Amino acid sequence: MGNVVDKVTSPIKAMRGTKRKREDNDSDSNEEINDLLDKSLATPKRKKLISTAKYIYQALFKEERNSDITVHALGKVWRLHKVYLSQSPYFASMFNGSWREADEDYVHIEIIDPKITIESLYSVFGSLYMDEVSLEPREIVSILATATLFQLDSLIDRCAEVMIETTNAETAVRYYEAACEYGVKSVKQSTFGWMLVNLLSLYYKNGKWLRLISIELMELLVNSADLYVMQTELSLYTLLRFWMFLKLHPLSDEECDKVTASDEQLQYFANRTSTVAFLNTPKGIPYERCFRALRLHNLLNHHVDIRVLKQDNIIPLDWMNEPLFQQWNSMLLVDQSLDKGPKEVDEKVFLDTCIRCGRTLPENEYLKWRWTGFNFGLDLILISDTKTLRVKRHHRTENERLLSLQVKRQFLIRVSVASLNDLRQVKHQQTTPIQQIALEKNEEAMLIMFDKELTYPLLISVNMLVVSPPRVSLNPAITLASPAAGPSKQRREAAACDDEETGAGNSTALSS
């Protein structure tokens, strides 16, 4: 019986022991909870009272209570507070220095910038009483001008953010000019980049926005190697002709919408009776600098381009002497196998002399194309297969008389690809380095593998150099001379090189 009692009491003791452990654990847990509660209650919590800022804005700015300074500008009076205005270095130096206004309660501000308006003054003064500001894109340039006057760097930065976010066809030129005027570098770079991508793909069809571009800005755009030239250099020439026509003939927005770059009205230049090139006339001289920025040597490699240039009579014929000489010289060097393509060209030289061409890939599909024109016997085909862009040296036996017979030809190439959002801002851009490629007949090479972030439609910009650039020696014995220089020495040196290369004399040169 005693054994039975022991067996019964043992589990009871065990249960009591378990209960004590649970009580101990619960006690420890309660202590931890209490510690956490004490800690949370002892830690100050910072919370923003939204009503405070609103009250200050309403009572002090809008209702002008307890004002200690009156500001008069553009015929309007604001009753404000020095302590808030002193956030601006403009006012801080005025109130705290040796200026007369430091001891007075009235300030008259002479506004000479026409971009500053009463509305922008109201917005900027009001921003000093609030911890946030509402910026209307249509008023952003005026607010930027006002913020610059009062040296409000934080507000200038917010304006820059809004301008970059809202850059589009309507605002790009206006934002760029404002950024130049008020020294906002980020906006200047952003808007200029936007125009490099969209000048030929968008403005070509929208005269009311194209005509806003100044002569100075157009020169910079045309001169840039980063310009997305859709098709070839002739497209850029045609756009310049359209732009100059719009500048010379002020039209309403409605009239501009009806005019296109191929409109009959643009026969204005070809229909002139004067034989003097338009850029040599008083009306044309201001635009000369923009047409000088064209790469004329790339406008002289197709018979249609030459015919258009001659019919329009915009560019003086004497401008073409040197490019034609250089083209002819390059062709002879390629024909004699003295130039097998450019090697290790300085980046600046490449960007200044390369062929600029491009196109839009509307859909994700297999596509191949070439840009027409004489490329010194090098027929290059671009091939897009949705994931990559490749180049092929196309060589067919029936066209051998027009193609280079060199076993291997080399060239330099750079490719840029961009996808745009609804505002035609660049969502993603991919650019290759300058690549040196050597291809045998009908050989292909990959140029770029598209990033997965790229979306269609894609804008493709290609820069190519297929012959050694002008005035760069292809052989130590050859020095290219200018058209004005005597050719006799150059001919003798070239003939000597021909003999060394071919092992033949004048008969080979004649037969070639």
Image: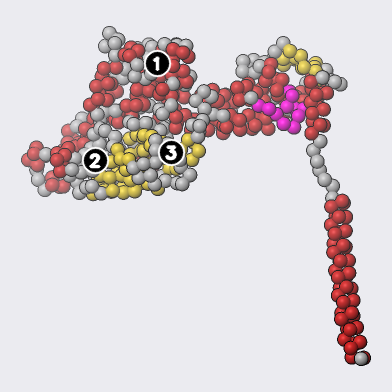
Q: Which residue is mark 1?
A: 259
The percent coordinates of residue 59 (x first, y second) are 83, 23
Specify the quadrant of the image occupied by residue 309: top left
Q: Nearer the viewer, residue 390 or 97?
A: 390
Q: CA distance from mark 1 to mark 3?
A: 29 Å
Which residues are drawn in magenta? Answer: 125-135
Residue 353 lies left or right of residue 21; in this view the side is left
Mark 1 lies on a secondary structure that is loop
Specify the quadrant of the image occupied by residue 430: top left
Q: Which residue is mark 3?
A: 456
Q: CA distance from mark 3 to mark 2?
A: 30 Å
Mark 2 lies on a secondary structure that is loop
**How was this image coloured?**
secondary structure
The percent coordinates of residue 190 (x first, y second) are 53, 33
- As drawn, which residue projects farthest toward the left? 507
Depicted 291 relative to depicted 10: above or below: above
Residue in the image at 79% along x and 26% along y: 57
Using the image, tell me which numbered label, if any, was put on residue 378: 2
Q: CA distance from mark 1 to mark 2?
A: 38 Å
Please report whichever mark, 3 or 2, sits nearer to the chain's N-terminal start: 2
Q: Residues within 10 Å of mark 2 (few under 14, many from 20)?
A: many
- As drawn, which residue projects farthest toward the front? 1
Q: Nearer the viewer, residue 159 or 485?
A: 159
Please report whichever mark, 1 or 3, sits nearer to the chain's N-terminal start: 1
Query: Given the image, on which type of amino acid does mark 1 rest?
Result: Val
The percent coordinates of residue 412 (x first, y second) are 33, 43
Q: Does the rendering let one see residue 494?
A: no
Q: How many marks?
A: 3
